[in-house]
Amino acid sequence: MILLSPSFLFFLTLVQFVTSSPTDNGAPLTIPLRRRERPAGTFIDVAKMADNMRTKYGYQPVLDTTLQRRQKVSGVSIQDEGPDVSYFAAIQVGTPHTGSSDLWVASTACQRGCQGSPLYDFQSSSTFKDGGTTVQVQYGSGSVIGELGSETISLGGFTVQNQGFIVAQAVSEGLVDAGSSGLIGLGFQTLAETGATPAVQALAQSNQLASPEMAFFLARNIDNPNVNSVNPGGTFTLGGTNSSLFTGSVQFIDIPNDITPSFWFIPVDAVSIGGNTINVSQQESGAAIDTGTTLIGVPSDILNEVCSQIPNSQNGTGSLAGFCVIPCSSSINSAMTFGGKSWPINPADFSIQQPGNNNQIVCVTAMFDLTPNTGPTPGAPPQKRQNNIPNPAFIVGDAFLKNVYSVFRFSPPSVGFAQLGSNGGGSDSSSTPL
Ligand SMILES: *[C@@H]1O[C@H](CO)[C@@H](O)[C@H](O)[C@H]1NC(C)=O
Ligand SMILES: *[C@@H]1O[C@H](CO)[C@@H](O)[C@H](O)[C@H]1NC(C)=O
Ligand SMILES: *[C@@H]1O[C@H](CO)[C@@H](O)[C@H](O)[C@H]1NC(C)=O
């Protein structure tokens, strides 16, 4: 039996469980999220993050170094991501991942990368079954290799029997933080390298949840000058929503029924910058909504239009190719429209500081071009996926998701947004829908 308890965490990096026992059967399980702040005076590496997002979703990376790393990954051993790992660990928002579907757990068989994690001892579990094959899962920021197995999994009071998962044998450094033991993917089965139905999808399908959904409030710390090394990062709710965190109703946008549910994939209607609306054509409207990513990846023509709406902006060059470089003094009102409703993005989330030349600080937009006309394969389209899984034209990460209460519903498959309430940091005017 694997339990989710404070000493045994399945959720990515910095998630911690304070309460894990719902009082009533089927009552929603609320889990506080934590996130690590970067040390003062350091910057997030947007170029590397953008490449991680590109790689995760089948787009070509732009930086040569990332290409080299990927080639190394395709062997059996897991490469060491090198000096930028601690950097990533330091800024990554530790949330359960809506952009992947596998569950893996650091085990006593782990040879590499599990130091500091509580380990799962499969040999002393009577319910463990060995699946007999080796599986590798590639995330944007690293990978995991292990043996397929099945086990009885408990999430608070919820239980899934025979859950397929990976008994990790090697984990890329920095993929999870010391103290965490693995990662639970919250996407759909079609994405799972193990082929297993993801645990939360299984709970939803077996009607164990009061409501077949999960919800996130992601806290904003970017504008908090008094950051500690670990901050409250928000709240994850499984099996329902937490009405104290949002106001009004949740507006759901269905995953189009002509595509196989895989990512949480919904159409985006428009992007607004400074009051000007840029309509998105239907062909390039598919957006993956991913709590496990930070920035917002967009098609080239959208990034160009966004950039052209911002006074004194420039196309980024070098490692900032694909980004729009803007004056750090700009306070930009932006928004994304889903299901006919426009959701504003706080200016603090839209502009990101970067080190420039001559010790100057420059700023870039949180939106970047997924297929910039640069790098080893300029403008290359994403690789085709199997199983009729579409490539998202947009990848919508936390720069947007911090501005809404987000709900991921399995049945009917849809993503919902609601206005944050004051408990969810929604007292600032920017979280009022336009
Ligand atoms: C809802 O969220 C609030 C604020 O995080 C928390 O105090 C409360 O316990 C949550 N309610 C439920 C029912 O989980
Ligand atoms: C954008 O779409 C809206 C709603 O469909 C429409 O009213 C508007 O005219 C469109 N704008 C442009 C520039 O095409
Ligand atoms: C940025 O690049 C786009 C596409 O190549 C181009 O149309 C635009 O004029 C460039 N903007 C600036 C400010 O150079």
Image (tube, helix red, strand yellow):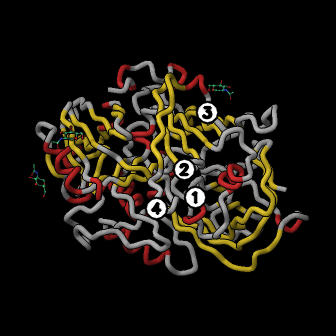
The image shows residue 69, relative to residue 325, as above or below, that is: below
Quarter in which the N terminus is drawn: bottom right
Residue at horizontal 68 percent and vertical 34 percent from the top: 30
Q: Earlier in the sequence, mark 4 or mark 3?
A: 3
Which label is found at residue 259?
4
Gap between marks 2 and 1 measured at Cα: 10 Å
Label 2 close to label 4 by CB (< 8 Å): no
Per the image, the residue denoted by label 1 is 188
Q: Which is more foreground, mark 4 or mark 3?
A: 4
Q: Which of pointers 1 and 4 indicates the residue nearer the eye?
A: 4
Is disc 2 in contact with disc 1, using a CB cutoff of under 8 Å?
Answer: yes
Number of the label disc, if any, that sits on residue 413:
2
How many angstroms separate mark 3 from mark 2 (CA)? 16 Å
Q: Secondary structure at mark 2?
A: loop
Q: Does the residue at mark 1 contact the one at mark 4 (Cβ under 8 Å)?
A: no
Question: Which label's residue is closer to the chain start, 2 or 4?
Answer: 4
Position in image of residue 169 (x %, y %): 68, 70
Q: Amino acid at mark 3?
A: Thr
The answer to whether the beta carbon of the residue marked 2 is less than 8 Å from any atom of ligand 1 is: no
Classed neighbour count for the residue bearing mark 2: other residues with Cα under 10 Å, few (<14), some (14–19), many (≥20): many
**Residue 150 sits in which quadrant?**
bottom right
Find out whether the residues at labels 4 and 3 contact each other: C-beta distance under 8 Å: no
The crowd level at tag 1 (other Cα within 10 Å; few <14, some 14-19, many 20+) is: many
- Residue 402 shown left or right of residue 304 in the figure: right
78 left or right of 346 in image: right
Q: Which mark is residue 53?
A: none
Q: Which residue is mark 3?
A: 241
Foreground mark, 2 or 1? 2
Disc 1 marks a residue whose amino acid type is Phe
